[in-house]
Image (tube, helix red, strand yellow):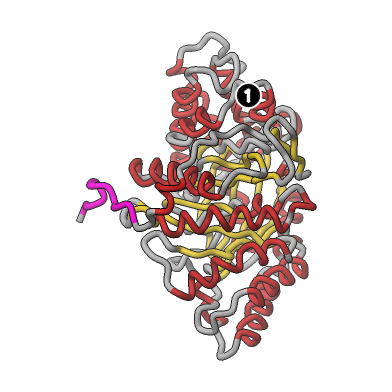
Amino acid sequence: MISKKEILETVSMIGKQHLDVRTITMGISLFDCIAATAEQTATKVYDKITTYAKDLVRTGDKIAAMYGIPIVNKRVSVTPISLIGAANNEYLSLARALDRAAMETGIDFIGGYTALVQKKATPFEVAMLRTIPEALATTEKLCSSVNVASTRAGINMDAIAAMGKLIKETAYLTRDRQSIGAAKLVVFANAVEDNPFMAGAFHGTGEGDKVINVGVSGPGVVKTALESIPSGDLSEVCEVIKKTAFKITRVGQLVAQTASKMLDANFGIVDLSLAPTPAVGDSVAHILEEIGLSSVGSCGTTAALALLNDAVKKGGIMASGHVGGLSGAFIPVSEDIGMIHAARKGALTLERLEAMTAVCSVGLDMIAIPGDTPPEVISAMIADEAAIGVVNNKTTAVRVIPAYGKQAGEEVSFGGLLGSAPVMPISTESPARFIARGGRIAAPVHANKN
């Protein structure tokens, strides 16, 4: 049982320390929506989402009022659309049906315009991938993800080559909106099926019909807790982070259980991810600096982030038997005021960010790069991150925005939680021959565990 004392103690973190439930995400299976024609499938998809999620926003608001805990986003994730549209080999009508359903229910985002091509893409998956730029350019709330690698399958370099071009096209088609389409597209290695965070959320094939996953975030709470031990050693730092993560996760557990009951859905997982926002006091970078760095990006950044990520996971696991998703620390540049500041002054580089992704929850996230970056360079960035994920048996991802018309040192602004970011310089040395080889990088030897 969660005691009243725990609730009151945690609620006291909200006002000044930016503790919030970042999202309640309802996962919905769409397998029973597959019909004889694309039009019938799209209609059934729209009807199911608007039926299952019709009370999601109202329920989230009610729970927020009940417990005094801000619930920032209400979202839906669905079965990978590459599978749902395969029978008719038509996807754009599904993209528009998803977006209409998101508008009708009032949710913030809908995820699942997804393909899982970690080993090889089927013809229908290739067709679906080609629709991603238009789908994201012609919708408002739709998010897309593609899994191009896994520890068990290896790295699909053909898919990675395609994604570099698709990211560029998506950015171009939304160039009048700061290339925001690319901010709604993420490329994964080892994607997880119960992630509640966008843009990478999808409802995995091993999930139930209707599931509630909750994402909790509190970078400001962790930083404030660390301020109480300015000279404590790193063992004490770990203990403080673990205890704080425990309390934060208990909030997620409470909200997830309540939402599941009120919405007549299965309780899936609590994702304890320290997901920052552009607000002052809500920064993962500032936690690392409180641990002892003069600036995020300095030598020692990767070690400090490894400590933080591990301690967060340990605290969360003790608080809930259903910790899942990505749980750990996110490092999205445009969404973290500390990361933005460090990038602007040159302390945080792409090379340092890549090193950090070896120990954080995801990867190169919400990074603006020059609009004239060649697609093979973007593909090579994805390949590097996929290699880190595959070899280390962890989730990694790339969400980069080639900002059309922008050069390194200029700024892009997306507003809201997506924030703003400096356009970061990137190596212009060409990996084109490497990417053009195609094929597959085999799974590492430690993948053979049977």
Can you tell which quarter of the image residue 137 is in? bottom right
Residue 117 to residue 237: above or below: below
Picture coordinates of residue 189, whole percent (x, y): 44, 51
Residue corresponding to mark 1: 286
- Mark 1: amino acid: His
The answer to whether residue 338 is left or right of residue 311 is right
Looking at the image, can residue 21 be seen? Answer: no
Q: Nearer the viewer, residue 417 or 349?
A: 349
Label 1 residue SS:
helix
Q: Position of residue 30 (x, y in %)?
A: 55, 75
User: In the rendering, at what x and y percent does residue 320 appear?
Assistant: 48, 46
View extreme (top): residue: 231
Q: From the viewer's perspective, is 197 left or right of 450?
A: right
Residue sitting nearer the eye, 156 or 40: 156
Please determine whether, in this image, residue 82 is positioned above or below residue 196: below
Which residue sits at x=53%, y=8%? 231
**Position of residue 69 measured from the top left corner of the image (x, y, whole percent):** 71, 44
Extreme bottom residue here?
Answer: 36
Q: Residues within 10 Å of mark 1 (few under 14, many from 20)?
A: many
Image vertical order of residue 361 relative to residue 325, above or below: above
Most foreground residue, 204 or 150: 150
Q: Residue furthest left?
A: 450
Quarter of the image where the C terminus is located: bottom left
Of residues 143 and 7, the one nearer the viewer is 143
Q: Is residue 418 visible?
A: yes
Which residue is located at x 52 percent, y 56 percent?
A: 163
- The magenta stretch is 440-449
Q: Is residue 445 magenta?
A: yes
